[in-house]
Image (tube, helix red, strand yellow):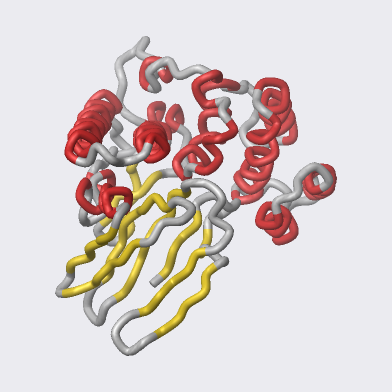
Amino acid sequence: MNLYDESVFYGGSYKHITKKDSSNYTTIQLEKIANPKLLEFTSFGENTYYITRIIISPGDNVSYTLKDGNLEFTGKKAAHYNFYLEMDSDYDDWSKLYLNKYQPDFKKYKQQCDSLYKKRVTFFNEYVKKHPTVSDEFKKIIKDDLRFEYLVNLIKPRSETQGSWNVNTGEDLTNMYERGHKQEGEFFDINGYLNNITIDEVNQPEYLNYLYFKMSIVPLLRQKFVKSSEIPYSIASFRKESTFLKENFDQKIIDYAMGRLIVDYFNQGFGKDNNTADFMKEVIENYKQTVHDSSTIMAMKDI
């Protein structure tokens, strides 16, 4: 069994766990849980892979069983744990969507995203009616998570395939659009495509606990808010994007997103040549002096 913590820089196994085994069950205690937290739960049977997401809160006591391919949570707050399992038991609803990045039909893809998001919100509303004892914190976490899940699948379309899953791309939307067939005079209305989302709607540091917000912040910065005319992944474009970030966002979001911006540029080759290596080293050294999160500092040391 593994619990994946979405709040650290890259995401990773939740580390503050103690286990006690007996003949019939295992007791797992999670420490340092100060506030309600969204974790990914995975476990392996002999021929079965179990995966879902759960919301845990300080003082929770819950049991789960894995049997014959079925995962079930029971206990006083079971409704907090079973939501994602009941909504999407195979954890693959979004992976069924697909945008052909060589002949993209953004209108059709957005309609699919809108429809699935509406379906999931409807399920949430019915679930809350069915389980009226769920906490206000649970309701807020779910609503925010569903919204950013929808957003990240818009700005990072499911246009690549891994096994039987369609996965989110790292390619810019406009690059895909320009490559496709379009009539003369057409242009990609990214504002309409992203429902005219504003900086105020995403400039909330509490969202840094959400995986999908963290996946979407840099694409939003680049494609929606900055839309730089500079050469992509150049020193000039980095300066423009990082300056906009620092001038318009909450400091906690800046502390995280600067690291993601650095990683994004590095993954595209920035900092690996003589023209940009010294610049990247200087950026990283300055950035490391402003952050205190150990997982972020480790990511910068790796680069």
Q: Relative to 282, does residue 175 appear above or below in the rendering?
A: above
Residue 249 % position (x, y): 65, 25
Judged left or right of residue 169, residue 255 is: right
The quarter of the picture where residue 252 lies is top right
Residue 126 image offset from top left, x and y in percent? 18, 34
Question: What residue lies at 52% left-to-right and 29% top-to-bottom?
Answer: 220
Q: Name, please, the residue furthest toward the bottom.
A: 23
Q: Is residue 201 visible?
A: yes
Residue 186 screen position, x and y as percent: 35, 13
On the rendered structure, is 88 left or right of 263? left
Image position of 141 with respect to 266: above or below: above
What quarter of the picture does the C terminus occupy?
A: bottom right
Q: Residue at x 22, y 63 (%)?
A: 72
Tag count? 0
Instruction: Name the outermost residue toward the top.
Output: 185
Relative to 139, say whether 182 is above or below: above
- Residue 110 or residue 267, whichever sits in front: 110
Residue 303 appears in the figure: no
The residue depicted at 43 percent of the width and 72 percent of the height is 28
The spot of residue 161 in percent (x, y) is: 31, 53
